[in-house]
Image (cartoon, rainbow, N blue to C red):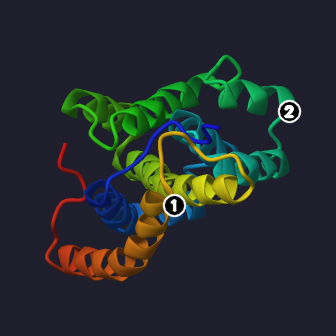
Amino acid sequence: METSKKLYSVRELYWIFYNGQRTMKHLFRAKKNKELSQEFIERIMLAVTEVNGCSVCFYAHTKMALEAGMTNEEITKMLAGVIDDVPVDEVAGVMFAQYYADSKGNPSVESWQRILELYGKSKAYGILGAIRAIMIGNALGIVWSALFSRLKGKPDSRTSLLYEVAMILVSIVILPVSFIHALISGSLKVPITNF
């Protein structure tokens, strides 16, 4: 049984951790400054989760979206990749989130510039922080979902027990290393985007 759409390499996992840690503060700041509502954040997280296909995150963010005030119908559509019910001023952010996830964190310069133009730097960086935060959750959740499915006798045909266990063990090592790397990059004022 396939429980995820995307699988990540060790290198991709490292950069997902690093980038997420670099932009998390922008998500918190945008939320604190009321630039991003909890509903908008959950729409972003559901959009990314739909692209990545993380079943653990489907469950968690469905619950959070309901608690944030989204309807069952809107959540169901979001998890099917349909954004009909997304407020007009959030559509570009949600579509960018889908594109970011689909490109494994490598969107075009033009798409990022458009997000900056539409939302302004602070809100755009908050959106990027939300995207990158859920990418961390999805990258880890996909592996854990695959392992739990395997233990229930329904393995993901694209993975192996070795891949699942190795990625979990590797994440224990690379999470603190990427955190230190992110701190050093922040202190050296390295840009948080390379696109």
Disc 1 element? helix
Q: Is disc 2 in contact with disc 1, using a CB cutoff of under 8 Å?
A: no
Q: Mark 2 points at which residue?
A: 72
Residue 25 makes an appearance in the image: no
In this rendering, position of residue 54 left or right of residue 190: right
Q: Earlier in the sequence, mark 2 or mark 1?
A: 2
Q: Considering the image in quadrants, where does the N terminus appear? A: top right
Is the residue marked by circle 1 packed among few (<14), some (14-19), or many (20+) residues within 10 Å? many
Determine the residue positioned at 77% across, 29% down: 76
Image x and y of residue 24, in percent: 44, 65
Image x and y of residue 8, in percent: 38, 50
31 vs 180: above or below:
above
Determine the residue positioned at 40% across, 30% down: 99
In this rendering, position of residue 90 left or right of residue 25: right
Label 2 to label 1, Cα distance in Å? 26 Å
- Amino acid under label 2? Asn
Residue sitting at the far top: 84
- Amino acid under label 1? Leu
18 vs 133: above or below:
below
Q: Which of 83 and 39 is in front in this view?
A: 83
Q: Name the residue under label 1.
A: 140
Quadrant in the picture for residue 180: bottom left
